[in-house]
Image (cartoon, grey):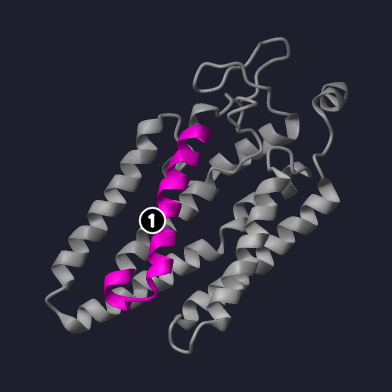
Amino acid sequence: MHRTRSSAGFSLDIPLIMLTASILKIFYWPGARFDRALLVQALVMLVVQSILLKVALDNRPTPLRPQGIEMKSMSGARSPMLTPREASFETQSTSWRPYNFWRWRDQQAYWNFLLTLTLGLSALHILLRPSPESAGLYTTLLGAAGLGIEAVLPIPQMLTNYSSQSCRGFRLSVLANWLFGDAMKMGFFFWSSPGKIPWAFKACGVFQACCDLGLGAQYWMYGEGLGEEAFAHLA
């Protein structure tokens, strides 16, 4: 994205999912006290996905415009024009969301949402801590939400690829890293000593690995799709 100055084809829902899941897992740790390595992973992921979100927003292309009008990214740099299929998906993805959630044009709105989520969880953590029963239920719900959200990480990208019938904008190296990470997680989850890793981590990890394999199948079927010149010819 930084090299091409365009985040076209990349789903902004990916950093949304990973940032939300990481924040929830960080607040989940004080009650569950799962392995510290998983807590460190959540902290690192929070930093990495924040950077990814910033880069994606800075290089987000403007909506499709009439032929001959040059497009620029949100950072002001020249950016490739969305293909007709990509523009169609952008329209579909924003039409059904209440208040245009996570499709805002103002970058500050994204950071405000993440800050509000963090402050809200902090307040709940403080208020429920004196009550063991409420705190236990809160911890369970927090863990289920965080792990469940992370498990659906590949789904937005799969929908993006299916809608455009192309994996343009989604790098093969990212997919390879995801699959490698899945293999490492599965080994860590299932070869660790019994009781060290909660079953919820294992179940969500298996589901996410299956979705990543689905992404691999899409890359094999769609590849990079038609090039821009071919789309221009079709248009």
Q: Please name the predominant secondary structure of the magenta segment in the image.
A: helix
Observer able to see residue 208? no
In the displayed structure, does residue 108 sit left or right of residue 213?
Answer: left
Residue range corresponding to the magenta coloring: 29-56
Question: Residue placed at 11% from the left, 76% from the top?
Answer: 130
150 is higher (above) or lower (below) than 173: below
Observer able to see residue 210? yes
63 is higher (above) or lower (below) than 56: above
42 is higher (above) or lower (below) than 160: below
Q: Residue furthest left?
A: 130
Quadrant for residue 11, please give it: top right
Residue at the disc numbered 1: 43
From the top left corner, tell me how far across and down residue 100 is, in percent.
Answer: 46, 40
Crowd tier of the residue under label 1, counting other residues whose Cα lies within 10 Å: few below 14, some 14–19, many 20 or above: some
Q: Quadrant of the N terminus?
A: top right
Of residue 139 and residue 30, the one placed in the foreground of this image is: 30
Question: Residue placed at 54% from the left, 40% from the top?
Answer: 94
From the top left corner, tell me how far across and down residue 159 is, in percent.
Answer: 67, 51
Secondary element type, mark 1: helix
Q: Amino acid at mark 1?
A: Leu
Question: Residue placed at 75% from the left, 57% from the top?
Answer: 216
Q: Quadrant of the C terminus?
A: top right
The count of marks equals: 1
Question: Residue placed at 66% from the left, 38% from the top?
Answer: 9
Quadrant for residue 2, please give it: top right
Indicate whether residue 30 is drawn in magenta: yes
Indicate whether residue 181 is drawn in magenta: no
Quadrant for residue 66, please give it: top right
In the displayed structure, does residue 166 sit left or right of residue 114?
Answer: right
Of residue 115 and residue 196, the one placed in the foreground of this image is: 196
In the displayed structure, does residue 115 sit left or right of residue 57?
Answer: left
Of residue 162 and residue 114, the one placed in the foreground of this image is: 114
